[in-house]
Amino acid sequence: MLQATFVPGCPDSSAVGLAFWGTGDPAAAAAALGLRSGRPTTLRTVLPTADASPVVPADVPAVAIALDAVLPALAAMPACSLLPRGRRPGDSVFAWSTAAKLALELVTAGMVVPTARVGEEGAVARWRLVSAHDGRLAALARAMPAAAHALRRDDAHVWTAAEALGAFCDAVADTCARGSAVVDEPVSWEQRWIAALSGTSPALDAPDERLRDELDAWARPLLPRTGAAGRLGGRLCLRLRAPRTGEAPWELEFHLRAAAGPATSVPAERAWSAGNATLELPGCSIGEPQDSLVRGLAEAARLFPPIDRALSEPRPTGIRLDVEQAAAFLADGEPALTAAGISVEVPDDLGAGAVEPLRARLRATAEDAPGSAAVDGREAATFRWEAVVGDTVLTRDEVSELVAPGRPLVRWRGRWVRVDARRAARIAALMDTAVTLSSTEALAAALEGSRTTAELGEVDVRSAGRLRALVDRLGADGHRQPRLAGIDATLRRYQERGAAWLQMMAELGLGAVLADDMGLGKTLQTIALLADRPGHRPHLVVCPTSVVDNWEREIRRFAPGLRVVRHHGTGRAATAEAFPPGAVVVTTYTLLRLDSPLLSEVDWDVVVLDEAQQIKNHTGQTAQAAARLRAAARVALTGTPVENRLAELWSIMHFANPGLLGRFPRFRDRFAVAIERWRDPDATRRLRSVVAPFLLRRLKSEVATDLPAKVESVVSCALTDEQAELYRATVRGMLDEQGMGEGIARRGRILKLLTALKQICNHPAHFLRQPGPLHGRSGKLERTAEMLSEVVAAGDRALVFTQYRVMGELLAGHLAAELELPAVPFLHGGVSAARRSRMVEEFQHSDDAAPVLVVSLKAGGTGLNLTRATHVVHYDRWWNPAVEDQATDRAHRIGQTRGVHVHKLVTHGTLEERIADLLDCKRGLADAVVGSGETWLTELSDDALRALVALGEEEA
């Protein structure tokens, strides 16, 4: 697994950077993440041991990348949970990615200061990052893994996480502040100073010592530090005491406590009296109490200025605060002081969460809220403003009572209330007025429990009446029975629940995202919805070209009463009248975009997007065309609702329920940045509360008890135009013109024909043996890449069997590129025994191994244990059930603890599909008669052979 360690002075003495190392090839693993421009090096790491034994440095091969080269990739890297498990690097890489994003945010905000330093190489000018008091740097340092800073700082010390993070952030500030220009011969010291700060070289003629001291004194209060109060024997403690009456002053008392040990404190008066003699306390002692107190007060005064006046007194023991200063202390001073290591104590009724603010809230009016009828985003819902303290709703007179004293903290009815005068005036002006939202916006606000308003920013929202009933219905976990009239299939329990849920959401006029794991039957559940709504309007299914045939087959198989209309090809419909009521129109994403004017004119009943990640780019033409479709109900099917970024979730949700997540810029600012960059738990909770009712996702592990040990499915794939032309030409040239002849020669010609057609179905490059691009030329290859992307994204592993070495090599190369993997191994007959064993061992036991293994059916169809795989893909068919079963059993065998999904690929309208149908219909006979692979096909007559191999539309 790839790790990253911050290395000052890497890759040369004038620049810092990161060294990437780990198992395998670090350069290739780094390049797969977009981390390039590195050079090979050897890194001496110092990692802790599990048994706390002495640390032994270890030299590891690494690739070193300069900071200016690595920053863009670190800043663009998505969060760990958004990367497919097979592509995730180690935690140290994500730690430095988070650090880079934080540092860049602070640099962008201008939180940098110039400094001058004198070292062994003379004086240099450097930019440093200003300290941020929101605790993020400290939290990141605490969470940073050892691998991120596993270097010696000198002979006796290693870099701590805090030291490495501070040096990294300063380096980011310095790197970003510099340009590439070289200043020509600056004359004055000021010019040399500016040139050293902005040019490529930080070298600086040593400034006057007094000027350098003044510069340090100016910058020191802004720079990060651990807090003087925490570096000596004692630690400053500030204790706030509230007045008995509202007019009396507040008291802020100074105390001193031990930096370690029991939380025992002494009043400042005792510390002054002790001077610098050690104070002995129960269970601990405080060294140099007077100096500790002085330094602690100086630090506190920097963070909370009212304390500054105490520093002019000879032996201060506390200060008095007016109510405005006390409110500022509670709101701003306490967090900053605590972050600097200064202890703060406040009365219980003034502690975190105890002081309630006077605030506004929006409450839905029961008569105007959207209810159990279908939700129409064009309808309006009314909310009224109300003033609250906690959960108590205030009258206008009670608001006036709180505002009248003119103080930011008011003692009211036994509690402290924080009153912002300006905000209170706006609240009073808004009371009893109304806000109108669309029904979709109202539902989103009710689910989230808050809404951002132009008047007061973010305010709480409370639902009522029918809206409350709708929210409760969406959150109900009861099991509904689906209506399955017209469905010729037996659904499993989780499929029944999914079908019922889809039917309920359609009844409510709400969009649904069905995000079950691949292989759990999303198509069947959706067909149950379509069959339940014959209606007076057509349905639309949009899917990749590679699964158009599969949708047609599945609808005819499971809902024979539904009419299917294919909107595809040159002869497709040009008017809406070609889509009869109740029919299911199946089309592709390409035609969704090209035929958008036509498709957006139709009033559809249900619109289904299969493989909905196709619209993950919300600015793309495909996503915009999907958003223009008019429908009573919308369904998105995807196994990966989020592949890399939350923007993809917004795009899919925007199709399913337009307006639910607001406009994208607002979504990005409120959710995406907070969650992807900072893992903000509150933002995560709020987003989940809005999205959860509209997204149903079941993992195979969750429904394992309802699944058989092995699930087999035939995946129908379409031929491309190139494949179809090659297929026809080969049939004509070998069957119609030459004929098959007699005897042994006939058998040879038939086998040659079958082999050629199977290779064409695989990929034109397989048949032609010509180099060239692979993408877009084979429906089977495209469908395989689509399926495996879901497998890899889910953290699963897959075996891909082919009987051809050439096709195996094509598959391995193409899948590595499509899945963004360093490599996909191919186990075939030419692999040595040692290499074969190593490939199996890595696939079975290494977390860093590629999650996909391509296997030659002959070389790996027997004798291997590959139970790490939960998916088996038969890319081309052997037409011998026993051989295919043996290959499948490489994964489905003793030692397998999870269900195995077997995907058998066939191309629609070709000999592959006809032979697969024969084997499925007469499997018992086939097991006995067709045991010799393809040999039995050589016994067919010319007419039977012609019917078998003819392309679909050319059948007699």
Image (cartoon, rainbow, N blue to C red):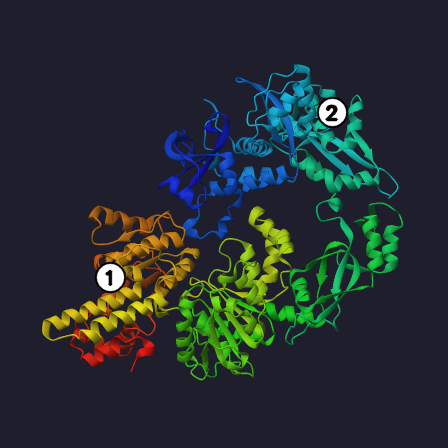
Q: Is residue 727 left or right of residue 644?
A: left
Q: Amino acid at mark 1?
A: Gln
Q: Name the residue rendered at 10%, 74% in the picture.
A: 743
Q: Residues within 10 Å of mark 2 (few under 14, many from 20)?
A: some
Whether residue 901 is visible to the viewer of this picture, yes or no, is: no
| Residue 63 left/right relative to 178 | left
Q: Which residue is mark 2?
A: 270
- State how many labels appear: 2
Where residue 118 appears, as percent x and y from the top left, is 58, 18
Q: Residue at x 71, y 20 (%)?
A: 274
Disc on res. 803: 1
Give the amino acid at mark 2.
Arg
Q: Is residue 773 above or below residue 885?
A: above
Q: Position of residue 372 (x, y in %)?
A: 65, 75
Give the position of the C terminus as an image quadrant: bottom left
Q: Quadrant of residue 519?
A: bottom left
Q: Quadrant of residue 561?
A: bottom left
Labels 1, 2: front one: 1
Q: CA distance from mark 1 to mark 2?
A: 87 Å
Coordinates of residue 805 in the picture (x, y in percent): 24, 57
Local SS, label 2? helix
